[in-house]
């Protein structure tokens, strides 16, 4: 079949095969990888897709909205000569979109005079600024012991049935710039949130929508929702569109943007399905070998750059299959990101929320975002002491399971008491409880005061005299 000139929009009649969300086109001429295409079916309706693979005179295309109803005889493909671009504007805050960036909140199309490539723009590593300012989430286990820093990427590792959706909801409602300068209202004006849901259930999406609306947080949130019954291929585009808006808000509008993405596991499952349809050689657990670089392309669209006052911070959420932290998805994610927050099934069973497992959790940039002038001067040492004490609690509990709690030494019994108080008073907090950093540190001192002063080996004597037993 003859083709028209590229300048007129390359038009090819007839596709040679359809398999799942993948179509194959031959006699294409010159076509580029990742090129945006339009697929026109027999009813003259248009779908969109992108080029997955190119060869000598053929192209493999993934159709974002699926291939249902497409026939080889009645379908034509138009190549655009560019990658997929989406409109971006500050007016998209307060709106809800589907996984392809189309409004689903019954509002008008947002006015957008700027279009951006969903693959983002590469950032010169030398232009990056080291993250040093913290974000307050109102959640003690994060703010005190795994502090989130603006420009950082910290995933949440969860599992099926663990309330990670509830935690994501709470973070979006409560997160704000943690600097001590200015009022909360002044800081909130420069803070925005982009939420991307991939393969989430309808009731979960509705719970997010209702919670953000009722709390007033929706005014500073842009939501992108790919639901469980939406096309699988769309899942691969949703986080890229969300991050494209975040880059515009951060680097063009000078806002501090927090990007929350759930569930990365659904994204990776979509990658695996497409890879299998293409007949690619699988890697670990059947996932494609390029999953590392694909996830890196998402996670590395984070940070701060010279010449811009804004920043992008990422909290991707993933459910670990079989709670296996060595599974390829959490394993690869841990290599790319700067720490992780691990949720515990054991704490969930004890009705402790949020069920953050403190010991395996980590924020690698925390030390640069806390301390005097940022949170409080005693914060670094206090967090270190809490961690050390709670780690010792695990040893004490193991010993008590053998000899019984009543046979423990007086010091170990104090640690046993500390462990219960730590989980019930510090880790545990209600879904609606938004703790300031001062409240969090006060609770930490109250719990540490259960232990004798001689056990507080990581805290300055002056801080012990100032705070011990006063909370």
Image (spheres, rainbow, N blue to C red):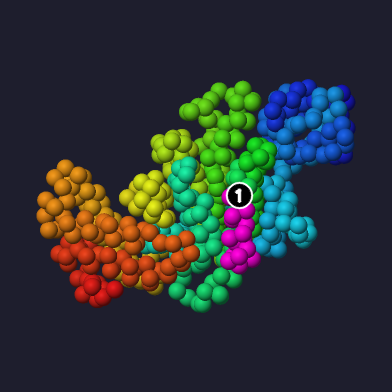
Q: Is residue 332 above or below residue 205?
A: above
Is residue 30 visible in this depiction of the protein? yes
- The quadrant of the picture occupied by the N terminus is top right
* Residue 241 screen position, x and y as percent: 66, 49
At x 65%, y 37%, the residue is: 232
At x 26%, y 56%, the residue is: 419
Classed neighbour count for the residue bearing mark 1: other residues with Cα under 10 Å, few (<14), some (14–19), many (≥20)? few
Q: Is residue 413 above or below residue 190?
A: above
* Residue 100 screen position, x and y as percent: 70, 46
The quarter of the displayed image where residue 64 is located: top right
Prevailing SS of the magenta stretch? helix
At x 69%, y 49%, the residue is: 98
Q: How many marks?
A: 1
Residue denoted by label 1: 203
* Residue 57 screen position, x and y as percent: 76, 24
Name the side, left or right, on which 403 lies relative to 72. left
Is residue 462 visible in this depiction of the protein? no
Name the side, left or right, on which 127 lies relative to 335. right
Question: In the structure shown, which secondary structural element does the residue marked by tag 1 occupy?
Answer: helix
At x 59%, y 55%, the residue is: 207
- Please state the extent of the stretch shown in magenta in the rendering: 203-221
Whether the magenta-drawn stretch holds residue 211 is answered as: yes
Q: Is residue 274 above or below residue 237?
A: above
Q: Is residue 19 above or below residue 380?
A: above
- Viewer-proximal residue among 49 and 413: 413
- Viewer-proximal residue among 76 and 210: 210
């Amino acid at each position: 079949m003859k083709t028209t000139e590229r300048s007129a929009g390359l038009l090819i009649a007839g596709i040679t095969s359809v398999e799942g969300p993948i179509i194959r086109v031959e006699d294409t001429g010159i076509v580029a990888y990742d090129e945006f295409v339009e697929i026109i079916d027999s009813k003259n309706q248009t779908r969109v897709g992108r080029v997955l693979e190119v060869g000598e005179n053929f192209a493999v295309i993934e159709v974002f909205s699926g291939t249902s109803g497409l026939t080889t005889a009645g379908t034509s493909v138009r190549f655009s000569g560019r990658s997929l671009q989406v409109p971006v504007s500050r007016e998209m805050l307060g709106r809800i979109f589907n996984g392809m960036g189309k409004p689903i909140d019954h509002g008008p199309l947002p006015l957008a005079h700027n279009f951006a490539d969903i693959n983002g723009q590469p950032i010169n590593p030398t232009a990056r600024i080291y993250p040093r300012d913290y974000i307050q989430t109102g959640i003690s286990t994060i703010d005190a012991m795994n502090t989130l820093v603006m420009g950082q990427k910290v995933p949440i590792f969860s599992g099926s049935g663990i309330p990670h959706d509830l935690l994501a909801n709470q973070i979006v409602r409560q997160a704000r710039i943690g600097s001590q300068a200015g009022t909360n209202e002044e800081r909130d004006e420069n803070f925005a949130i982009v939420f991307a849901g991939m393969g989430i259930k309808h009731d979960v999406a509705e719970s997010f929508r209702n919670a953000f609306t009722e709390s007033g947080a929706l005014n500073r949130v842009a939501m992108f929702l790919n639901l469980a019954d939406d096309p699988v291929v769309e899942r691969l585009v949703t986080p890229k569109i969300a991050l494209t808006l975040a880059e515009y808000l951060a680097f063009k509008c000078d806002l501090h943007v927090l990007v929350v993405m759930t569930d990365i596991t659904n994204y990776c499952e979509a990658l695996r399905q497409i890879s299998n349809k293409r007949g690619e050689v699988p890697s670990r657990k059947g996932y494609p070998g390029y999953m590392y670089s694909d996830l890196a392309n998402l996670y590395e669209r984070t940070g701060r750059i010279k010449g811009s006052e804004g920043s992008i911070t990422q909290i991707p959420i993933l459910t670990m299959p079989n709670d296996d932290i060595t599974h390829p998805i959490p394993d690869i994610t841990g290599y790319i990101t700067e720490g992780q927050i691990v949720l515990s099934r054991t704490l969930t069973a004890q009705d402790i929320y949020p069920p953050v497992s403190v010991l395996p959790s980590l924020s690698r940039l925390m030390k640069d975002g806390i301390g005097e002038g940022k949170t409080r001067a005693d914060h670094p040492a206090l967090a270190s002491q809490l961690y050390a004490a709670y780690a010792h609690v695990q040893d004490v509990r193991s010993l008590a399971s053998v000899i019984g709690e009543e046979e423990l030494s007086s010091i170990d019994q104090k640690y046993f008491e500390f462990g219960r108080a730590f989980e019930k008073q510090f880790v545990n907090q209600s879904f609606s409880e938004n703790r300031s950093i001062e409240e969090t540190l006060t609770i930490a001192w109250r719990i540490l005061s259960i232990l004798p002063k001689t056990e507080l080996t990581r805290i300055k004597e002056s801080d012990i005299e100032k705070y011990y037993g006063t909370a």
